[in-house]
Amino acid sequence: MGNSKSIIQVLNNHINRNGHNLLREFSDFLALPNHASSIEDTRKNAAYIKDMFEKRGVNVEIAELPGASPCVFGEYRTPSAERTMLLYAHYDGQPANPSDWHSDPRHPVLRTDTIENGGEIRSFPSPGEPIDQDWRIYARSASDDKAPFIAIAAALDALRENNVPITSNLKFIFEGEEEIGSPHLAEYLQKYKDKLHADVLAICDGPVHQSGRAQLFFGARGYAGLDITVYGPNRHLHSGHYGNWAPNPSLLLVHLLASMKEPGGRVLVDGFYDGADTLNDDEKKSFSTYPDNDEKLKKELGIAQTEGDDENLIERLLLPSLNIRGLDGGETGRQAQNVIPSSSSASIDVRLVKGINPGAMLDRIETHIRRQGFYIIRDEPDNETRMKYPRLVKVVRHVGYAAVRTPMDIPAAQYIRHAVERIAEEVVLLPTLGASLPLHDFDELLHIPIVGIPIANHDNNQHGPDENLRIGNMWYGVTLFASMFSNVIK
Amino acid sequence: MGNSKSIIQVLNNHINRNGHNLLREFSDFLALPNHASSIEDTRKNAAYIKDMFEKRGVNVEIAELPGASPCVFGEYRTPSAERTMLLYAHYDGQPANPSDWHSDPRHPVLRTDTIENGGEIRSFPSPGEPIDQDWRIYARSASDDKAPFIAIAAALDALRENNVPITSNLKFIFEGEEEIGSPHLAEYLQKYKDKLHADVLAICDGPVHQSGRAQLFFGARGYAGLDITVYGPNRHLHSGHYGNWAPNPSLLLVHLLASMKEPGGRVLVDGFYDGADTLNDDEKKSFSTYPDNDEKLKKELGIAQTEGDDENLIERLLLPSLNIRGLDGGETGRQAQNVIPSSSSASIDVRLVKGINPGAMLDRIETHIRRQGFYIIRDEPDNETRMKYPRLVKVVRHVGYAAVRTPMDIPAAQYIRHAVERIAEEVVLLPTLGASLPLHDFDELLHIPIVGIPIANHDNNQHGPDENLRIGNMWYGVTLFASMFSNVIK
């Protein structure tokens, strides 16, 4: 193997010969339920991963902490390795409500294109059958974040079968609680620190750029969340017999939410934007790699006007955000009932940028809620509490993690950048991903540079109904990991 | 039978002997699904009612119009009758979401008390077993509005078996679409007008007073409704990758709803209160029969402060109301997902008072929506429409019916009032019920005075989860109808 072209050829041949097996293995893996609320389920995923990687010559250990989903550690030792790379991915997924999906989120289906483009369900390919790069697999976690597991495993297969030498030590950490805010990650990192020495941490999560270009990111927004419930009468009331007299919690809730953020996007919580770090020169320079894709994206998404209309997407992602991710005050449409509901709820997620502490951000929001005249409680109220406070709100805090941005110019990061550039024509460099990743714990506890290497298509419906992965992006992942692991051209 | 005391005694004996049969018949009737969206279901209810009343010597005819739930007409002829009374009830019910109920809304259960008071499920009584008046039957439509059917049938049984003469002609009209706004009632009334000549229309619906006292009402609020859906991106988006940039429809919706009504209860839609008729002297006088029960009611319902805090319930019911009956912008709590939803919805019901036209009221609200910068559409938008209007809302109008208040002093109304006073110690006289009833069509098309004779307990959870009827209220109903039908003392 003398040059990059031939490696790409070798990989393409490998994919053509083995694509059907790879999709079958992916489908089996996706069929395992993986919400972190069920440790029984996450254990099955961990066992599946152990088996998957041991088959590829990786030493695997499943670690557990009380009340936590298991964390899977792996190591692939390379004699006289030039560097050690630690790869992170998470195998847990968001909840999925099957009634919102076109097919069962736990029963992966292959479609000939996206649902929006009229893609039809087709059978998984048989050996030798050509596979179209625009096919999609639909299932929860197809893109977020089970795809890298299969891509890494396939890259190891391809290199071994074609006698391409691996030139780095590889370490793996696979988390099972990312989608619930990584509550045990720090404890795992602390306890297993010795296994995790490396020159660089590669985060295998997130999508490539909306333009379809390859993308590397050097940080991610942090996360905090609140569930708020506003109370009305202690039982649902008939809206005719009591409408105008009994307070409606949905009315109080919409006023509270409206007070938090202008329709144009400006958050009105006092101090919301305070304390954010400014960008350094490398980060500012990286903007030149960022394609001006916003108008195309607006058209794709059917958006006439964005929040903060004169700022583009990348600028907006460098600010903290407050998003009403869920809203519930009784049934609507044909199922609507003529009631004053007993309570109404909203779920809010906050994305943090570097320099803002998640707990302090939640404090700012709670101060705002109190200023609107609400009394905050932490549990369901009894009648005495209801009688005492005309505006009563239960707030459940989810203190996630802070944002991280790491330097873009250190050697290990440059190494990965070159590995990507060998197989991709143009690479977008992002100072931060818009999404949140638990990078903070890595940054604090491991002190190694972090580079994000996403592989999923941007239109993957991550977290929502009809999550999917484009097959071409899985092939990109296989090629990307093979390029990172082998590095025959430096 | 010489005096009212002995009639009450006779009725009590009848109830003691036959209560178990009566509850069994009620339970069978409640088990029939009755949402007006299924004509197949409503037909089964109509057939059940026909059988129930024919057994009691009533001539019954089931009428149908295309696309409508059947309307059941009945007549019980009395030679040399002193008057003709037309009784109205509806056999259809609100939708019910079983997951919100303590027991299946379609599988009636008997409890020893309310769920709130720790009432336990018990078996239906066997013959001779004493029946507690505080027991409750839980099922959809137990109070709204299947109870009167059983009470009327039992009253006819009791009078016949005890040879108490019936002194009026009785006519019945049983509707099957009240809970969806009575879309075909006018057509039925027009077509079958000749069957409906009567001296008075008795509306068998609604609850007795919150104090437990008997109640008569001489009108009801009208009804109009809107379903509104606000649009964001054309698919759910990850709130990290797009939060701050893609507009969130829930944010736009809460601002729109907050603009419609102050937290304190004042509706901000221009002209909302315009055109309401003032009360006449009889109506004002009736306030003296209205017990001051508001503080007790606030305590019972866990309400610290009502909307329009210094006005009491009856005053508030004489105003039009705007109520957010449903609100939906994605999942909350443990099911919440980190998304920007593609659309968010609210369902609004408007209660009208006499003098305000429902269509005109919906126009006022739509004008308000447009003034908030929204473009109103009637169907799901295509991408071109989405790209054209930054604030896009789908409004589905439900033009219900106008409010009615009829005179309180005419002879037929006084006759019913005396029938109630014979069996109840104190009677509350209400110029209007807070709830909406399709009285407008009766008023316009039949031109007969209307008196409402509710029997259900006020805490019946009508329209909400755990709807129930207190057994004592069923007994009250049996006694009330027997007193109305027999009238041995004038």
Image: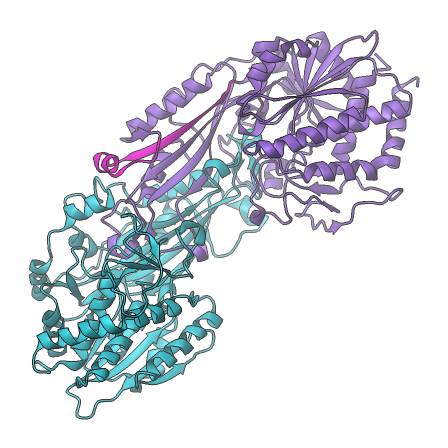
Chain colours: A purple, B cyan
Q: Quadrant of residue A481?
A: top right
Identify the residue at horizontal 26%, vertical 80% (top origin): B157
Quick one: quadrant of the C terminus of chain A?
A: top right
Report x, y in % for residue B71.
38, 77
Q: Nearer the viewer, residue A273 or A352?
A: A352
Any part of residue A208 in sight: no
Quick one: quadrant of the N terminus of chain A?
A: top right
Q: Residue furthest bottom?
A: B79
Whether B242 is drawn above or below B6: the answer is: above
Question: Horizontally, is B278 left or right of B94 in the view?
Answer: left
Q: Quadrant of residue A55?
A: top right
Report x, y in % for residue B328.
44, 46
Q: Nearer the viewer, residue A100 or A217?
A: A100
Which residues fall within the magenta stretch?
A379-402
Question: Horizontally, is B398 left or right of A138 in the view?
Answer: left
Identify the residue at horizontal 41%, vertical 73% (top origin): B45
Q: Residue furthest right?
A: A1
